[in-house]
Amino acid sequence: MTNFAVIGAQWGDEGKGKVVDILARRFDYVIRYQGGHNAGHSVVFQGERFALHVMPSGVFNEKAVNVIANGVVVDPFQLVKEIEGLRNRGVELTPDNLKISNRMHLILPYHGIIDRHREGVGSRKIGTTGRGIGPAYEWKAARRGLRMCDVFHPEYFKAAVAAELESLNNRFSEIEELRAWGLKEMMAKLQPVLDILKPHVVDSVELLSAARAEGASLLFEGAQATLLDIDFGTYPYVTSSNSCAVGISAGAGVPPSTVDEVVGICKAYTTRVGEGPFPTELHDETGEALRKAGFEFGTTTGRPRRCGWLDLVALNYTHQLNGFSTVAIMKLDVLDELPEVKVCKAYRLNGEEITHFPASPVDLNAVEPVYETLPGWQEPTTHIRTYEELPEKVKAYIDYIEKYVGCPIGLISVGPDREQTVIRDRRLKDD
Ligand code: IMP
């Protein structure tokens, strides 16, 4: 079977949830392999909007098995809340359709406290979601983390939590909220939620290996996006995991050859939340119009998103990294009313035009975008379902992007609902 990955091509919030949801109908497994509940996927299903955080987007498809793999970091309280929230709206998650890796790291209450504390002090603010993601990955790398498999060994688990609390209270004695957590209280709060999750725990290496041997089809769902990748994003203003396709093998415990097709998800413009460089950011009324028309407020934190024009230098870079088989252009309809549409085709840095994406945040903050201005189509597209029906000016815009990046655009999204989608690439069609 053909295995797919869906990867954000910008700074996140591109609409991966919608594409995964469309695709998930024909996949046997939908796998999250990095990040945590910092992600916020909006899926509109039968007119209802669902916000998923750590849950794979295959939950609305009865056939799919959803896997939270080893590379994800999970706050058990939030995961249980998400399971219960879905159940209240008629989506039942059982040990058969939701599997959690025994090697997955836990975000414990102290990770969130440290994350929020760091964002509140000092000058190197990242603008994190404050959910403890960074500290949980730090703990993993420092070999101090606790994993789902540890939950099955209560004495070991409790002793490790006790050791962490003691060491944290020494290291971060200034954080009052941290001192408030005693071992007894921590264990009493954790136990019931961990007990709810236990029946879902599996060895996901075994599970996915067996699935592959049986010829099952796998869909790997990226969270955040390539420009937030810890190695390749706009470091240090990034998340703490490999959020581009390079992270799949390590984050899901599958051989690198597992993924056949990589679908890049890109908005028709650009947004970013949190701090960090953003070369095409608009601080004018066009930026405000994009925010309003695109309803650009974070699914997870509610923060207004920074908005700007589509950056093809960045898209080309993310294509180099991920090797997209096809790109999905999302939220095209947000541009419907604009008299002209700009795309960034180069950067000017120290008087020179460049077309590569600089590594340094100093350079990225200094670049000036060089734009190509294309005519706006100024007509509604939300009702359109086939490529042929799209206005000629939209086709010219799509054509420009395809030629620049050298990658076909296989899907164009013209509204939030599943149905509001133009699919050009047969591989993305539901079959
Ligand atoms: P963290 O992942 O909470 O540590 O935050 C690090 C950076 O990634 C911040 O700029 C966040 O706003 C950003 N970020 C994390 N998750 C998402 C997401 O799902 N969409 C967009 N930005 C995100």
Image (cartoon, rainbow, N blue to C red):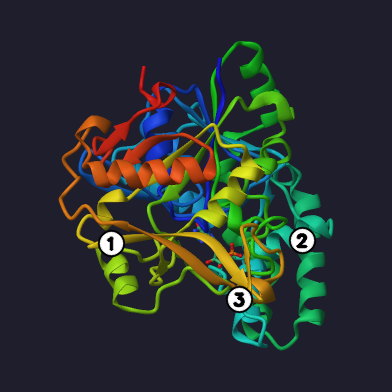
Tell me the tag on residue 340.
1
Q: Is mark 3 within 8 Å of ligand 1?
A: no
Disc 2 residue crowd, few under 14, some 14–19, many 20+, Cα 10 Å:
some
Q: CA distance from mark 1 to mark 2?
A: 48 Å
Look at 50% across and 26% down and name the residue there.
96
Q: CA distance from mark 1 to mark 3?
A: 25 Å
Q: Is residue 334 left or right of residue 133?
A: left
Q: Which structural element holds mark 2?
A: helix
Look at 75% across and 46% down and name the residue there.
150
Q: Nearer the viewer, residue 80 or 270?
A: 270
Q: x, y (%) of residue 65?
A: 50, 27
Look at 43% across and 34% down and name the residue there.
58
Quarter of the figure with the C terminus:
top left
When the figure is inspected, residue 128 is found, relative to residue 192, above or below; the finding is below
The kind of residue tagged 1 is: Glu
Tell me the tag on residue 139.
2
| 2 or 3: tag closer to the N-terminus | 2
The kind of residue tagged 2 is: Trp
Residue linked to disc 3: 365
